[in-house]
Image (tube, rainbow, N blue to C red):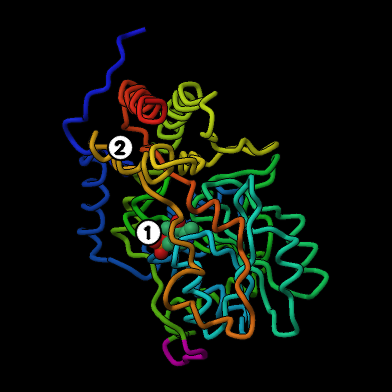
Amino acid sequence: MSRLNLSAFEKPIYVTRPMMPELKDYNTRLEGIWNRGVFSNNGPEHNILENSLKEYLRVENISLFNNGMSALISAMFAFKISGEVIVTPFTFSGTVHAITLCGATPVFADIDPVSMNIDPTSVNDLVTDKTTAILGVHVYGNACDVYGLQRIADRYGLRLIFDAAHAFGKKIGDKPISSFGDATMFSFHATKLFHTGEGGALVVKSPEIKQAVELFKNFGIQNEDSVTAAGFNGKMSEIQAALGNCNILNLESEKSLRTSIMNIYSEQLSGIDGLTLPPIMHKEIDSLQYYCIRIENRSDNFSRDHLYNQLKKYNIFARKYFYPLCSDYACYQDLNGKRKINVPIAEKVSKEVLCLPFYGSLSQNDALQISEIIKYILTK
Ligand SMILES: *Cc1c(COP(=O)(O)O)cnc(C)c1O
């Protein structure tokens, strides 16, 4: 075992660094695009990526998008979501904005204290005759209680939609994550495990809904002579798809590198009183999107914010995902006017979480050094 290394990093270490293919491999694909002069509208790169993703994610009805948020908005429109949508406040802003932008009202449910995902019991308590859908997020790639949520959706005739921006390639047992619910969104933003720079996808159960989604993502244009719906532009470009076609070849090696980093953190940071490692969910295959620890807020010198601020002095920029809660955003203060927002567990969890630097090109030595620094900060 080498000596403890508690020196600051020379260059800043951020929470993630995108997977990057060899530039020459991307150039080869770009040359093809240049030769064809086709940059969008279901070109060959797009179609290759769609087929690769069908196979990788083991899905039938997938539509590619210019980003994940467009994919989520399209799901809302395809299902004609209105009224109230029950959603977790412990998520990225885009999840909740997608509901609002479609003219529906987000209603915030509390989360499970261990998985940190939307709690079916809280969801059940919030159903009214205005509720049309439940929107769950597989936070940090840990799956929601998909069976519990489906039972509630079935009981009240609600749509069940998932934001799987953190859960690319995730499985529950041998079932792909997108086989649950009516629709599942993936984000291919550069900060996500698999990415196309900006990009996303929507997987839906029914072929009819896929048709509605495809129409919506291309201005509602049915053919040259007919426009049948008020749609928008959600199309993925050839430049984006080409990057995806390069990145997908390196996905398994990225995942195995991230697994090594995960194992280092889990070994080095275990057994620290007041620090909780990421939950290991039963029978799930990990998505390896984030490595998120929780720090109990005990004192000025032992808290999430203390650790976060101290790490900066070592040039380590961890992230407080997800803080603040969406239910605390100024734009969502008056939404549930008649109803008090009651999410005590989410409030506690959002003050404890800290996502550590986690990406394939982080060296094992750097992960060890980061662990040593965390231990030093929390125990000195
Ligand atoms: C990244 C992310 C999104 C947004 O995806 P984009 O592709 O950036 O539009 C939505 N929800 C969650 C949970 C995310 O992490």
Taking the view exactly as shown, the residue that stands out farthest to the front is: 299
Which residue appears at 21% of the width and 58% of the height? 35
Residue 96 locus on image (x, y percent): 50, 70
Q: Classify mark 2: helix, strand or loop.
A: helix
Residue 88 occupies quadrant: bottom right
Quadrant of the image containing the C terminus: top left
Foreground label between 2 and 1: 2
- Residue 249 position (above or below residue 348): above
Answer whether labels 2 and 1 touch (C-beta < 8 Å). Answer: no
Residue 70 occupies quadrant: bottom left
**Residue 1 within the magenta-colored segment of the rendering:** no
Identity, as a three-letter code, of the amino acid under mark 1: Pro
Dominant secondary structure (helix, strand or loop) of the stretch shown in magenta: loop
Q: Is residue 108 left or right of residue 19?
A: right
**Residue 228 within the magenta-colored segment of the rendering:** yes
Which residue appears at 38% of the width and 30% of the height? 374
Query: Circle 1 is placed at which residue position?
Result: 44
Q: Magenta residues, as a range?
A: 224-230
Front in this rendered view, residue 208 or 147: 147
Report, in whole angstroms, how far the alpha carbon at label 2 lies from the one at label 1. Answer: 45 Å
Front in this rendered view, residue 98 or 301: 301
Label 1 environment density (alpha carbons within 10 Å; few <14, some 14–19, many ≥20):
some
Taking the view exactly as shown, the residue that stands out farthest to the left is: 10
Label 2 environment density (alpha carbons within 10 Å; few <14, some 14–19, many ≥20):
some
Q: Is residue 200 visible?
A: no
Identity, as a three-letter code, of the amino acid under mark 2: Leu
Q: Name the disc covering residue 311, or none.
A: 2
